[in-house]
Image (cartoon, helix red, strand yellow):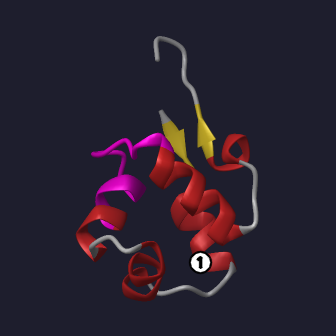
Amino acid sequence: MKNKVKEERLKQEFAQTEFADQLSVSRQTIHAIETGKYVPTTTLALKIAKLLNKKVEEIFILEKGD
């Protein structure tokens, strides 16, 4: 699964630490999501989308084979 978390986070001028704090997760979790090493839970994906004021589908993109 690809994602645009970093791109959208930077557009809204959130630092990783601030973004993580708003979501009640660690900065390392945000880094892992942004680098594709961790796929967030449905709940966390929804929280990310809400914080970024986007639809989940605008941030998380299924790839062939997912």
The residue shown at (54%, 23%) is: 63
Residue 37 vs 13, above or below: the answer is above
Q: Quadrant of residue 31?
A: bottom left
Mark 1 lies on residue: 10
In the image shown, does 33 or 21 lie closer to the viewer?
21
Q: Which residues fall within the magenta stretch?
A: 31-42
Residue 26 percent coordinates (x, y): 27, 73
Q: Secondary structure at mark 1?
A: helix
Can the viewer see residue 59 in this picture?
Answer: yes
- Amino acid type at circle 1 is Leu
Residue 50 vs 59, above or below: the answer is below
Residue 36 percent coordinates (x, y): 36, 46
The residue shown at (67%, 69%) is: 52
Q: Bin the neighbour count of mark 1 within 10 Å (Cα to Cα): few under 14, some 14-19, many 20 and up.
A: few
Residue 19 horizontal side relative to residue 57, left or right: left
Can the viewer see residue 4 in this picture?
Answer: no
**Is 36 in the magenta?**
yes
The residue shown at (64%, 58%) is: 49
Residue 53 vs 45, above or below: the answer is below
Q: Quadrant of residue 17?
A: bottom left
Residue 54 percent coordinates (x, y): 75, 58
**Is 7 in the magenta?**
no
